[in-house]
Amino acid sequence: MGIYEISFWFLTVMALSCALGVILSRNPVNSVLFLIATFFAISGHYILLNAQFLAIVNIIVYAGAIMVLFLFVIMLMNLNADTEPQKNRLVQIAGAISGGTLLLVILAALRTSTITSLDQTSTDIGLIKNLGKTLFTQFVLPFEISSVLFLSAMIGAVVIGKKEQTV
Amino acid sequence: MNFLLLAANQQTPFSYLPVAIQLLVGIGFVVLTIGASQFLGPKRSTADKLINFESGIPSVGNARQPMAIKYFLVAILFVLFDVEVIFFYPYAVNFKELGQEGFWAVIMFVAFFLSGFIYIVKKGALDWED
Amino acid sequence: MKAIIAATVLGVILMFAGLFVKEKKSVASLAVFLLFVLLGVNIWDLVTTAPNETLSFFNNMLRVDRYALWFNTLMTGCTLLYALLVSKEIQRVGSHVAEYFALICFILCGVYMLSTYNNVLILFIGIEILSIPQYILAGSDKRNLKSSEASLKYFLMGAFSTGILLMGITLLYGATGTFNIIQYTFLQSDMLSPMALAGILFLMVAFAFKVSAAPMHMWTPDVYDGAPTPFTAFMATIVKASAFVAFMRLFSVSFGAISSDWMMVLAIITAATLFVGNITAVFQQSVKRMLAYSSIAQAGFMLFAVLAVNATAWQGMMIYAVAYSVATIGMFAVLMKMKDYTYDGFNGLAKKDPMLAAFTTVFLLSLAGIPLTGGFMAKYFVLLAAVEQGKMMWLVIFALFMAAVSAYYYFRVIMAMYFKQGNAELNTEVSATDRFLLAITVLLVIVLGAAPNLILNI
């Protein structure tokens, strides 16, 4: 077992257990912290896949900026007391069954398909240079169009977040 | 020591090995010092010592107070422009090769963002007093 | 392609118009004028493309054919009609009138992408551009708690379904190694990997959510009921129709060859949608909520076009999109004039305002699918497509039965207007312009019913 496998298993265990921590911890702030740890583990996976740009972006945008927003939302909601309503047992069972079925479908799908194992030294599509080349030539349209998405998000922030001047 | 040779090559995941080692050392140091002081230090816990330290003043209320939406507005606008800046990294690396076409693509993208920025400023979304 | 750029630029112009033009009324007039321009650009796109020509843009990201251009033009026309009819009500929602219209322009940009996409990345961004402005519009009435609730519910559920869409795209990419929807066709039944099948299933679920098909319809009544009525009218018509065209494009262009693999699942979704939409609509007391359930029921009929992978289905989708949009926009325009949104609010409208009652009757008849209206032709074409395909006869019979059920709740409004005693109170005075526009809408509904070939032979 080389260093590659060791780090792979370490990151996998870390990602899965932190993800479980997100949904199992009672305190929402703890959930956010677990989520940040999950993002770091996933960034580690990106590095193992030689997708260095994705790894950095994942940390800057998700672990950095978006998690701050999550914390803001939790502060805004004032989740002080344990206000989580008691869930219906029937709904819980139905959720478990449907989630389990989905898991079964995905497992069945992945079990039979052949995925060529990745040679960790030879792929370099995730390197920032190659990614940039593809992004600005082949995928230039989605890149440009995404600015419309950002504009609507800005309008939304102003429309919903800004106090109405005179009503 | 094969992987150390690989680490010298910048194009592989192994070039991040020093970063990982540094991370481990950093975390290990913090865990070690805090853990050591926990175990080695004397424990004389009194009721006064167990309350949260708040600059010597008795703590009032709870930290979970609803706060103004203004903070959130600024934060979400920050995220949008943060994402915009991210797109510059891959462009900067390929600046020469992409030439005219890439330049205009980025200019158009930035123009949309700039108009969004002007809109935000004019609309007063960043004004603190209102 | 020109239309996408135009919609974006006009959206930006409208965004800034709110800063410089303070008068709400002039902003609305500017918006209507810009929508006229957008319609002009669409027609320009349409006439400069030869009938059998297929253009592709940006390394095959977009594939523009005559059908897509014609659909875009019709949807822009519907938006224009909508803007003319409800611009007064939009001005009453809140103080950001220019922003609302800008968001509508951005949604139109998403509509154009969804009708021409040739790459699932464009599909994804198109769906997002379609959805995010809707979340904002749903929550635009900040003084109303139900509007905020609708917005939050829609956002959370919508984000979840977008996640499912992405998961489906990922699985398909894993199975095929491409994002291009044309290249998905090499999937043959005998070599179909379970991974691709799971991907198709995920995509189907995500689309079923976006078009509010049962059992992914739970958000629809609350969102449509809570959102400000003018924006409900937009969400339930143009947005839904374009989500359907995107659905159909992927499932007939890419997965058409393997339709036997997914047909049964979609048939069950269709049956559930028809059943839930129609049966629940019967029990509603509010006309707005009834229209929300009726939009679920109508989605059940539109699903037939997706199910029947043939040429008639494309025609059926086109006419259904237009006929349903026009009639629903008209119905919502009337509803916005009413003070009370319950059935009782319509009591005695025929005595008080016979003209408005007559218009309402035509819209409702069209929604119910009575002959000589656009709604009948629409239902006829989608069911014809299913009959031609011939595998789903039981579903067609079920749909006919459900159409009969739907007549009950549409006729309940007509009964209230004509045969019940009461004093239907109007919110605002119905101006001469409103009457003229409603008359045009009625005319469109009837023309669609009498001569559907006008929009089919293009």
Image (cartoon, rainbow, N blue to C red):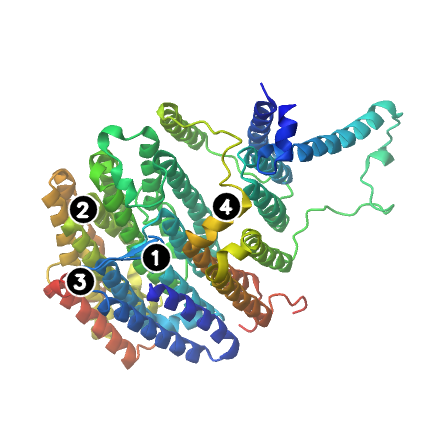
Q: Looking at the image, which is closer to me, C33 or C349?
A: C33
Q: Which residue is mark 3?
A: C51
Q: Which residue is mark 1?
A: C113
Residue C60: horizontal and vertical position, in percent? 33, 52
The reply to whether discs 4 and 1 touch (Cβ–Cβ < 8 Å) is no
What amino acid is labelled 2 in the image? Met
What amino acid is labelled 3 in the image? Pro
Q: Residue at x 57, y 31 (%)?
A: A15
Q: Quadrant of the C terminus of chain C?
A: bottom left
**Spatial separation of the CA atoms under disc 3 and disc 4:** 40 Å
Label 3 vs label 4, nearer the camera:
4
Q: Looking at the image, which is closer to me, A48 or C259?
A: A48
What amino acid is labelled 4 in the image? Asn
Q: Secondary structure at mark 3?
A: loop
Q: Secondary structure at mark 4?
A: helix
Label 4 vs label 2, nearer the camera:
4
**Spatial separation of the CA atoms under disc 4 and disc 2:** 55 Å
Label 3 vs label 1, nearer the camera:
3
What amino acid is labelled 1 in the image? Met
Q: Which residue is mark 4?
A: A130
Q: Secondary structure at mark 1?
A: helix
Q: Which mark is residue C230?
A: none
Same subunit: marks 4 and 1: no
Around disc 4, counting alpha carbons within 10 Å, would you say few (fewer than 14), some (14 to 19), or many (20 or more)? Answer: some
Q: Earlier in the sequence, mark 3 or mark 1?
A: 3
Around disc 2, counting alpha carbons within 10 Å, would you say few (fewer than 14), some (14 to 19), or many (20 or more)? Answer: many
